[in-house]
Amino acid sequence: MMNTVKKEQQTASSKPEHTNENLKQNDLYKATWRWHFYAGIIFAPFIIFLAITGGIYLFKPQIESFMYQDLYYIQEGQQKVDPTVQVNEVKNAYPNAEITSYTPSPAANRTTEVGISNNGEAITIFVNPYSSDVVGTLKDDETLMSTIKDMHNGIFWGGTLGNRWVELTACWGMILIITGIYLWWPRKNKSLFGILFPRFSKGKRVFWREIHAVTAFWFSLFIAIVLLSGLMWTDVWGNMAKSVVDETGTGSPEGDQPWEKYAFPESAVPTKDVADVPWAAENLPVPESGASGITPISIEKIMQVAESKNVHPGYKIAFPEDKTGVYTVYLDPASKPWTQQTLHIDQYDGQVLAHLGWKDYGIMGKIISLGIAFHQGEFGFINQMFNLLLVLALIIIPLSGLIMWKKRKPNGKLGAPKLPSDFKLLKGLH
């Protein structure tokens, strides 16, 4: 009899504690759901928009090769004209323009690209390398892919504010993934259906809920990689990341290094301000030409220096901006990030003042560069097709969430999840 009473007392004393724990867990679930709900409602349209514009930009090589084939491709000839002659032809055609860059013909049937600044307008001149004839021109900021890119990064529709909003969307995208995994996490259901696979016979509300949750689960890791790698380009998170890798020495080396006999120069100008270089080289200080000279060396000499450093075809040469400036040679290939290179070359004697390649990147520099290449589908057609699946997932997930919300919300009301009853630790989630 006494044993029975003791057991009942133990049960009675442990029950409130167990109930308390359940209430806390229930409140945590409700609070997390509210975060997920409001973030989803606010950012879902922008996530869909970014997915669509990113999906189009993913196929930039194919789209531009088709759209501008008359500018990109020419009949293969016998002997290419010297680069200096090609540039002089552009100067003759645009006598008041400033030459800003030169991209050697990367293949026997491809044109040379000469960048100019004409009355403050950036223009690319396409030149037949066999005859030095100007094939055609494109204004850099008026190409379709340039417009799509600016739509994707928010510049096109919101300027700096739009760019910040895109960055905020990516940040909240990460929060949506984390809170979504918590909400999805199996608690009682032991069946794989409804957890790893959607059920199609449980009604429309259950269908849309599971399409939303299951799709997000399968693609969450890769979506996180895309979001994080995208943040590396942003002004706030991107600059913070650069500061961290620079301070820890995990991005690119600093000072006098064994890989090159030249110390990095003291300069307040980062390389990203003079050329569209790879991410890991963006903060490399730009040196000044130290040799005393009047006439800069030829483009042919710059190309010889680049090729002596094993820079692969497809590289671009940015011209010096003034008499103390340097030639910047950089390669950021679309399929092999490990062949990236950036060189600063004295414009008067051809000395390599700074040279940064893949082998010189720190661990974070390599990881981030690979992430960016994956983000842009630069590992070939398979990467593009996989990222196209991610694009579809990034459309399906928020769209199914909005449909699910529409089906459950009462008429004329927002239909937000209820507030937790009393959960002081997560007051901010109320």
Image (cartoon, rainbow, N blue to C red):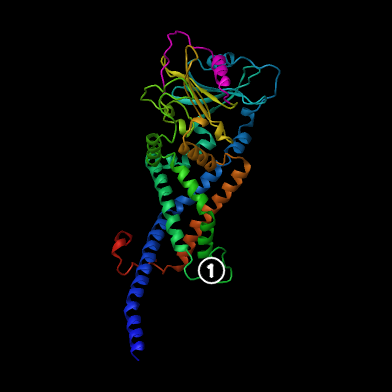
Query: Is 147 situated left or right of 68 in this image?
Result: left
189 inside magenta stretch: no
Quick one: SS at disc 1? helix
309 inside magenta stretch: yes
Closer-to-camera residue (310/41): 310
Closer-to-camera residue (13/194): 13
Residue at figure coordinates x 63%, y 42% from the top left: 381
Q: Disc 1 marks which amino acid?
A: Lys
Percent of width and height locating residue 183: 44, 63
Query: Is 129 situated left or right of 413 in this image?
Result: right
Q: Looking at the image, can residue 407 be seen?
A: yes
Q: Looking at the image, can residue 416 be seen?
A: no
> Which residue is tagged 1?
204
Q: What is the chief secondary structure element of the magenta stretch?
A: loop
Closer-to-camera residue (359/421): 359
| Magenta-colored span | 286-311
